[in-house]
Amino acid sequence: MITVVGSLNLDLVAPVPHHPVPGETVLGGDIAQHSGGKGANQAVAAARLGGAVTLVGRVGDDDAADVLVESARGQGVDTTHLLRTRDVPTGRALIAVNLSGENSIIVSPGANSRLTAADCEAAAEALRTARVTVLQQEVPDAANHAAARLAGGMVLYNPAPAVTGAVPPAHVDLLIPNRTELAALTGSAEPETIDEVTAAARKLSGADAVLVTLGGDGVLLLEGSASLHIPAFPVRPTDTTGAGDAFCGALAVALAEGNSLEQAARWASAAAAISTTRTGAQGSSPHRDEVAALLAGHA
Ligand code: ADP
C-alpha cells in the first residue's frame, strides 16, 4: 500500500492574449477546469499504475471539494482520509496561459494550508502500514514531519514546489528534487551539467538516497557514494506539466512492489516520458500496460 500526504487543488486555466500588468483587465478565452494539486496528482498517477493508494489531505466545504474528491475516487484512490474544512475554501490554482504557452499562476492553498500534524496522527494506521509514503511541499511542514515520523515504510520526499526556507523531515529515505528544487535546498545557483547536479546533490544531508529529475536530461540517482545517470526515454513531448508528479507516483508503485531504486527509477522515467506526450496533469499519467509497452520497445 502507498500513502500520499499532500495537496488537492482545482486548477482554473484561462487562455489570454497577454498577461495582465497591474491594473489591467485582459479578456481571456474559455476557462478549463482540471483536478490538480501535487498530492492528488501523485496519488492518481500511482493508482492509474495499479497501486493501492490512500490520500491524506484537506479540502474545503464547497463544490470544488466535491469535484476533487470525486475525481480522486474515480481514479481508484482511497479518499477516506480526505478531511473537510469548514469556512475555508478548497485549494485553487488560477492559471493564465499566453499565446506562447507561458503560464502565470496564482496558487491559493486554502484548505491545504490547514493540514496539521494531528490530521496525520488520525491517519496513523494508513501511514504505519504503507510500504511507501510520499510527501511534497504544498502542505505545512508540521504535517509532513508528523507523517514522516509515523510512516512504517519507506519515505519519499518531493520538495516541490521549490519553497525557500522549507525544512524537509529529519529522516527521509529518498529525496526527489528537480534542478530548481535542488538549488532551493542547497541555497546555490541552479546546477546545469550532470557533474554540477551530482556535486549539488552530494551536499544534501538527511536522506539515504537522492534522485534528481532533469526533464529531458533524465534522472540522476545518488545512493551512498555511487551515482548513476539514467537518460530520459526519447519521446516527442507536447506538455511536460505534471511530469514530476507522474514520476513520483510511478516511483512509489515500483518501490512498493519491491524493486530496487535503479529499477524503479527506470520504470518511473518511462511513465513520466509517456505523460509528457499528452496534455494536462492527472489525466496524462499512463496505465501500466502503456509503460510495459514503452519499456518493451527499448529492451
Ligand atoms: P518537474 O515536472 O518536477 O519539473 P522534470 O521536468 O524533471 O520534473 O520531469 C520529471 C521526469 O519526467 C524526468 O526525470 C523524465 O524522466 C521525465 N521527462 C520530463 N521531460 C521529459 C522529456 N522531454 N522527454 C522524456 N522524459 C521527460
Image: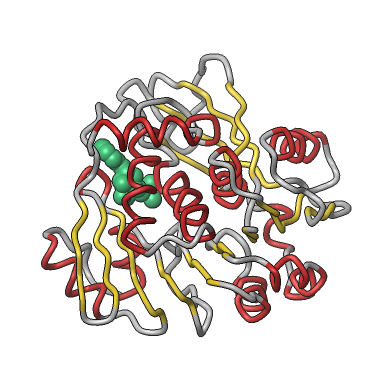
Q: In the image, residue 65 lies at what x, y percent?
A: 78, 40
Q: Which of the pair 103/270 is nearer the observer? A: 270
Q: In the image, residue 282 lies at what x, y percent?
A: 55, 35
Q: Quadrant of the C terminus?
A: top left
Q: Which of the pair 130/26 is nearer the observer? A: 130
Q: Which of the pair 88/68 is nearer the observer? A: 68
Residue 239 occupies quadrant: top left
Q: Quadrant of the N terminus?
A: bottom right
Q: In the image, residue 273 lies at what x, y percent?
A: 33, 37
How many numbered circles does the render carry?
A: 0
Q: In the image, residue 266 lies at what x, y percent?
A: 31, 51
Instruction: Name the residue: 75% across, 33% down.
Output: 67
Residue 103 occupies quadrant: top left
Residue 277 occupies quadrant: top left
Residue at the farthest top position: 29
Instruction: Name the residue: 26% across, 73% down.
Output: 201
